[in-house]
Amino acid sequence: MITTSRPGGPGLDERSLRDAFGTCPSGVVAVCGLADGVPVGMAVSTFVPVSLDPPLAAICVQRTSRTWAVLRTLPALGVSVLAGGHEDAARALAARDGDRFAGLAIDTTPEGAVHVLGGPTRFVCSLEAETGAGDHLIATLRIHTARAEPAIDPLVFHRSGFARVSRPREGNSR
């Protein structure tokens, strides 16, 4: 049961709201760049294509993120859509401590964007704008390049866990 909030009424129950948000599956991306020659990155489960002209996407990050405080200052960000099978990469990039890139296959562009290899899509972006949204920031990213591998299925975050997209078998479309 989800409670609703009315002006002057009781607030939402945080657990119920978290459970409700959890029913909305979302893709998982790695947002990474080079800071002083060292890869810095994080996993983000809110990535939204925004505009074709100009080419924009958005991510949502916690205001308290120390990693975003570094990434937002970089001239180039690599945004990698993670693939089914990248669960360990997503967990490593979401960790608060330790080497987030240990064991990850990555590539760095000349501009300093860092990508996790093996996913369905890679973007090179720069920060266009930030907007406050409660305890998060909505960061609008300008897309400079995009590379897609449509045959690779993405990783999905759903109900506080990871899932894989399942495509219908050929000849079984609905």
Image: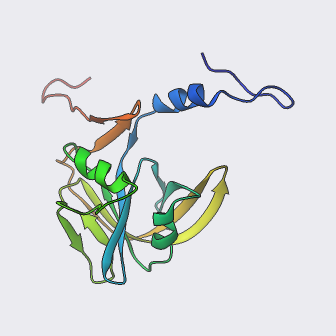
Q: Residue at x 87, y 30 (%)?
A: 8
Q: Quadrant of the C terminus?
A: top left
Q: Answer left or right for 129 relative to 5.
A: left
Q: How is the image coloured?
A: rainbow
- Write down the quadrant of residue 49 in the picture: bottom left
Residue 35 lies, in percent from the top left, at 38, 79
In this view, the residue farthest toward the front is: 97
Q: Can residue 53 be seen by looking at this rendering?
A: no
Q: Answer left or right for 26 relative to 127.
A: left
In this view, the residue farthest toward the top is: 1
- Write down the quadrant of residue 64 in the picture: bottom right
Q: Residue at x 22, y 26 (%)?
A: 173
Figure disc tally: 0
| Front one among 45 and 174 | 45
Residue 81 lies, in percent from the top left, at 31, 54
Q: Looking at the image, is 2 positioned above or below residue 150?
A: above
| Front one among 37 and 116 | 37
In this view, the residue farthest toward the left is: 170
Q: Residue at x 47, y 31 (%)?
A: 22
| Front one among 47 and 73 | 73
Q: Residue at x 83, y 26 (%)?
A: 9
Residue 165 lies, in percent from the top left, at 26, 35
Q: Quadrant of the N terminus?
A: top right
Q: Can residue 108 be seen by looking at this rendering?
A: yes
Residue 70 lies, in percent from the top left, at 47, 72
Q: Answer left or right for 4 relative to 69.
A: right
In this view, the residue farthest toward the right is: 8
